[in-house]
């Protein structure tokens, strides 16, 4: 993904400042998505599942398997550029891991042409617990790694091996808790996009190949209405991430994540939470209680967002400093942070899916 303006250390914190900035900036060739305007608070907020009870909260918080998470990261952590043998190996690993856990897994395969490398065969991985469900919460990430001729060893730890591993770990850890969702109308989908990365230069035809294809296909098939929300995970794994609420129509769900983080912190259930020592921030938390409406980050959510699918984008701002460098490898992963985020996301999914009244 990329952002359209340089963020540096002083990033934009409020939307009035952002819109003033848009007015003074020279007109760009590429569209700046000012996404807040597309939405009214709508039906998404009509679904209002109960918060986890104290006993559920404690029970679910104690479920974790850090060793599995680490193994999953390591299994994905190889250069995996679309069209290479490694890419097939990682795809097969994801597919097999989920089928072993009794998920229904299908590939959405298609051809597209990329600069430099030419025609490629892409495969989005779509995993569901109930392929016949009427509505889905989708947790998504991308599994390809960036083609970097000058850094052929680039493994994209945060981009996005860790997010993929977190989703596989969620399926593993919550195997039993998620089983009822094999037959419910509201169910869970895990989506692993292919071809997120640009091959030459990020642009509308050279980026998010898989997401563009799938959003268009599902639009044509009338399936987008079945998506409650697309939760996109990206650039996770480095210490001290800061998240912001990007979209007003999913802000209540963003606040649920922030609440779960605080609830875990209160119960001292987060690992090495306040002292990673890398960034000192006040207040020190992952989910900032701030909106950032500028919508300047282009990522796999864009083709869905443009078709009015509610989106929750879990990407840290600023991006990890190692982004798109060969240093985005296992040494940058902070497993305490990774386990903490994985836990928050698992609780969020359970609250969303099991809290129906
Ligand atoms: Zn990337």
Image (cartoon, rainbow, N blue to C red):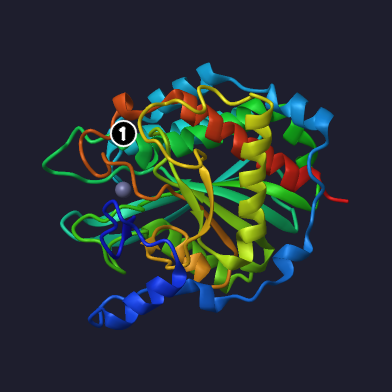
For the N terminus, which image quadrant? Answer: bottom left
Residue 272 can be seen in this image: yes
Residue 23, position in %: x, y? 32, 83
| Identity of the residue drawn at 26% across and 53% down | 8
Quarter of the view holding residue 112: bottom left
Left or right: residue 253 versus residue 87 is right
Kindly identify the residue that appears in the image at 83 percent across and 50 percent down.
356
Instruction: Tell me which residue sits at (62%, 60%) in the image.
Output: 251
Label 1 residue near ligand 1, CB within 8 Å: no
Q: Position of residue 22 (x, y in %)?
A: 33, 78
Residue nearer the viewer, 144 or 170: 170
- Where residue 144 appears, as percent x and y from the top left, is 35, 44
Rendering coords of residue 302 (x, y %): 45, 65
Residue situated in front as seen by the camera: 346 or 169? 346
How many marks overall?
1
User: Foreground residue, 196 or 39?
Assistant: 39
Examine the rendering and report whether any part of residue 223 can be seen.
no
Task: Specify few, some or many for label 1: CA neighbours under 10 Å numbering under 14, 14-19, or 20 or more.
Answer: some
Among all residues in the image, which is located at the extreme right? 357
Name the residue tied to disc 1: 86
Residue 161 placement: quadrant: top left
Which residue lies at the image location 74% right of the left edge and 53% below the top edge? 132
Is residue 264 positioned above or below 311 on the image?
above
Q: Secondary structure at mark 1?
A: helix
In this picture, residue 119 sits left or right of residue 46: left
Outermost residue, left side? 150
Q: Residue furthest front?
A: 282
Check the image and report above or below for 133 versus 42: above
């Amino acid at each position: 993904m990329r952002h359209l303006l340089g963020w540096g250390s002083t990033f934009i914190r409020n939307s009035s400042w952002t819109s003033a900035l848009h007015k003074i900036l020279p007109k760009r060739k590429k569209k700046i998505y000012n996404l807040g305007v597309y939405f009214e608070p709508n039906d998404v907020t009509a679904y209002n599942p109960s918060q986890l009870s104290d006993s559920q909260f404690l029970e679910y918080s104690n479920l974790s398997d850090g060793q599995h998470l680490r193994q999953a990261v390591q299994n994905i952590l190889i250069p995996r550029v679309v069209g290479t043998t490694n890419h097939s190996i990682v795809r097969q690993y994801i597919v097999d891991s989920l089928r072993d856990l009794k998920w229904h897994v299908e590939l959405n395969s298609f051809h597209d042409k990329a600069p430099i490398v030419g025609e490629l065969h892409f495969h989005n991985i779509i995993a569901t617990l109930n392929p016949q469900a009427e509505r889905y919460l989708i947790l998504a990430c991308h599994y390809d790694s960036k083609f970097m001729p000058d850094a052929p060893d680039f493994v994209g730890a945060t981009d996005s091996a860790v997010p993929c591993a977190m989703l596989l770990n969620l399926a593993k850890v919550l195997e039993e808790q998620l089983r009822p969702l094999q037959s419910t109308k509201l169910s869970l989908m895990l989506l692993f996009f292919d071809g997120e990365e640009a091959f030459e230069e990020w642009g509308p035809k050279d980026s998010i190949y898989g997401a563009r294809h799938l959003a268009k296909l599902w639009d044509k098939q009338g399936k987008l209405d079945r998506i409650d929300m697309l939760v996109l995970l990206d650039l996770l794994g480095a210490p001290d991430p800061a998240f912001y609420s990007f979209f007003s129509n999913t802000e209540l769900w963003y606040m649920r994540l922030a609440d779960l983080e605080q609830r875990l912190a209160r119960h001292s259930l987060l690992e090495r939470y306040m002292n990673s020592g890398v960034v000192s921030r006040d207040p020190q938390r992952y989910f900032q209680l701030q909106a950032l409406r500028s919508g300047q980050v282009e990522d796999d959510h864009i083709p869905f967002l443009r078709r009015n699918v509610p989106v929750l984008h879990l990407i840290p701002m600023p991006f990890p400093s190692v982004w798109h460098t060969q240093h985005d490898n296992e040494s940058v992963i902070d497993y305490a942070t990774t386990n903490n985020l994985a836990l928050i996301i698992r609780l969020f999914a359970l609250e969303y899916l099991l809290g129906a009244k």
